[in-house]
Amino acid sequence: MNITVLLKQTPDTESVIRIAGDGKSVETKDLKWVINPYDEFAVEAALRLKEKHGGTVTVLSFGQQRVVEAIRTALAMGADSGVLIEEPALEGGDSLAVAKALAAAVRELNPDLVLCGSRAVDFDEAQRGPMVAEYLQWPHLALAVSIDSDASSVTIDRPVEGGKVTLEASLPAVVTFGGSHAVWNPRYASLPGIMKAKKKPLATKTLADLGLEGAQQAKIRVLSLEMPAQRAAGRIIDSGLDTNGKAAELLRTLHEEAKVI
């Protein structure tokens, strides 16, 4: 079984996010970059399927040369090869332009399965997987927390209110992964894996290499970014009151000052 994992490099979730001077982008100078956490679940799922059924795992990503670090991390986890779409024209594109380029690269790789996170922790658009599936005209199974596959089909579990639902699709297919209910955690890259990753093949592609003349004009533009409003400081009800007095004062505050009841 040959699997392609779509991987995005995102800022570490513990990074301090600052808005750049243009007011519509994020300052990237001091950010630490990591694999999008939801894509890590996809990498782990791919490696488990490979261990069970054999085959190969190829990591496919896009962006600047710094993205190579994220690809190498996935290779150190156990993936076999990587492909980076490095194209300046995509820098000004939107999710649709990126999905079109990823789909073109997937066609060249010709996998049985495409796996990726259901969303990315930067812009949280949840569009990449469904758009790639649409360009490929493949079935899309969303929000998987477990997966199994054979030579002809793929089966996933996804959470629903109060339980789970099991879905199946014929191959080839695209599966996107949620994270909060996953039945396993992504593995860490071992030292031997890190050393081996340095020698694994990693190809760089441009849009021209993929048969695309250039990135399509963005359908969505970011007009502005702003930080959330700072929360007001909390208030402690006078500790000198007894329990009944505290309850009465809390009720008065919620009614007369906060006006929430």
Image (spheres, helix red, strand yellow):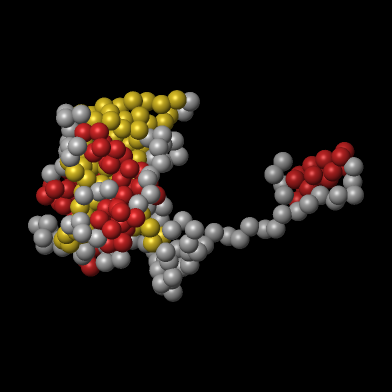
234 or 167, nearer to the observer = 167
Q: Toward which corner of the image does residue 150 lie, by quadrant?
A: top left
Above or below — where is 66 with respect to 52?
below
Residue lying at 86% horizontally and 40% vertically, measured from the top left: 243
Quadrant where the image shows the N terminus: top left
* Residue 15 visible somewhere in the drawing: yes
| Number of marks present in the image shown | 0
**Residue at the bottom extreme, as displayed:** 21
Quadrant where the image shows the C terminus: top right
Residue lying at 41% horizontally and 60% vertically, measured from the top left: 11
248 or 11, nearer to the observer = 11
Whether residue 158 sits left or right of residue 51 in the image: it is: right
**Residue at the front extreme, as displayed:** 192
Above or below — where is 84 with respect to 173?
below
* Residue 102 visible somewhere in the drawing: no
Residue lying at 34% horizontally and 55% vertically, measured from the top left: 191
Image spot of residue 112 (x, y percent): 17, 38
Image spot of residue 146 (x, y percent): 35, 33
2 or 225, nearer to the observer = 2
Q: Toward which corner of the image does residue 30 lie, by quadrant?
A: bottom left
Q: Toward which corner of the image does residue 233 lie, by quadrant?
A: bottom right
Whether residue 108 sits left or right of residue 222 in the image: it is: left
Image spot of residue 154 (x, y percent): 24, 30
Whether residue 231 sits left or right of residue 20 in the image: it is: right
Residue lying at 27% horizontally and 62% vertically, measured from the top left: 68
Image spot of residue 141 (x, y percent): 29, 34
